[in-house]
Image (tube, rainbow, N blue to C red):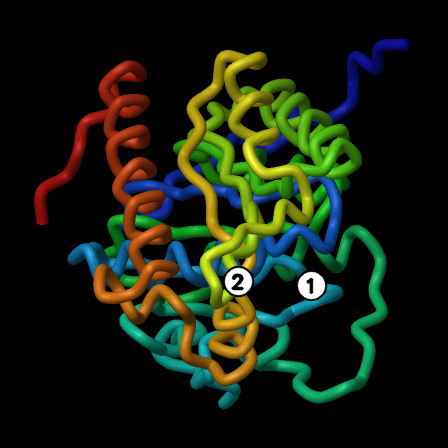
Amino acid sequence: MSHPHAPEPPSPQRLPGIQHILAIGSGKGGVGKTTVAVNLAVALSKLGHRVGLIDADIYGPNVPTMLGATRSPSIIGDNLMEPILAHGVRFISIGLISPGDNPIIMRGPRLHQILRQFLQQVAWGELDYLLIDLPPGTGDVVISLVQTVPLSGAIVVSTGSAVALEDARKAIAMFLQTNVEIIGLVENMSQMTLPDGSIIDVFGAGATEQTARQLKLPFLGSVDLDPQIRTSGDSGLPAALGGAATARGQEFLTIAEKIIARTQELAAKNGVVMEIS
């Protein structure tokens, strides 16, 4: 039923100085979405880009731990929060404001308010890429996001399991229904290589790439299941810091390079004029 007097939804507004805003989502929790988001932010920075990261997973704000920086942000001119800088990445998270083990209990409108504050009331400065680590699932945080800022695209993270991919397809449909282009799919925890060189297929390696082909979407790459990724995240030293000198670092660099190329491709297709600073 239509409501002729209902207010129009707000139009998304560009953030000054930020070239591309990319959402990173997953259909379900537990697939390593935040791990991928943090490492891709570090990889993009290592490739010479100015990178910001918003931890929009309000109920599970793990980015501060993974980046090894937990101090509260300062308030600077015009009542703006100053993002924390870690490993070349500027980031903000509710985990910096409400640290520790206390649960964050709030309802939808408050979540939307926090997201808008992280977008509009943080002194991001000049950025080439602002990544947004979304909550898992297909909640209305994405609706709030697309109503606030124009997105350059979305990256969907999944394991190769049938259950995870079933939910990943829902996340893809959610982005497409909100007119957000899909940058591509990433398969996390793809396979595990043992010290003797043998390989264990834990979650169904290759199934995410097959799904991307079926949906005619780009496959950005896969990241192996490696305890070193977990330990590096726990210690605040993301695996991507290893760069091309390590296998996992190279995997994240390769995915980041594909993200850059795909983002530029979509910008050209949509007639976006790049600003030179």
Q: Residue at x 25, y 61 (%)?
A: 45
Q: Check the image and name the residue furthest to the left.
A: 276
Three-letter code for the amino acid on which mark 1 is drawn: Ile
Task: Say how many tags the image has.
Answer: 2
- Picture disc at residue 194: 2
Whole-percent x and y of residue 177? Answer: 64, 19
Q: Nearer the viewer, residue 44 or 229?
A: 229
Q: Amino acid at mark 2?
A: Leu
Q: Secondary structure at mark 2?
A: loop
Residue at position x 48%, y 26% in the image: 182
**Viewer-proximal residue, 129 or 73?**
129
Q: CA distance from mark 1 to mark 2?
A: 35 Å
Q: Which residue is mark 1?
A: 58
Q: Quadrant of residue 19?
A: top left
Residue toward you, 63 or 12: 63
The residue at the point 53 percent across, 45 percent down is 24
Locate residue 105: give its quadrant: bottom right
Give percent across and percent down for residue 23.
51, 43
Q: Residue at x 78, y 23 (%)?
A: 6
Classify 10 Å Cα crowding around label 1: few (below 14), some (14-19), many (20 and above): some
Q: Quadrant location of residue 166?
A: top right
Residue 117 appears in the rendering: no
Q: Along the polypeptide, which appears first: circle 1 or circle 2?
A: 1
**Place of residue 270 in the rendered image (x, y in percent of width and height, measured from the top left):** 31, 16
Task: State the residue lying farthest toward the front.
Answer: 196
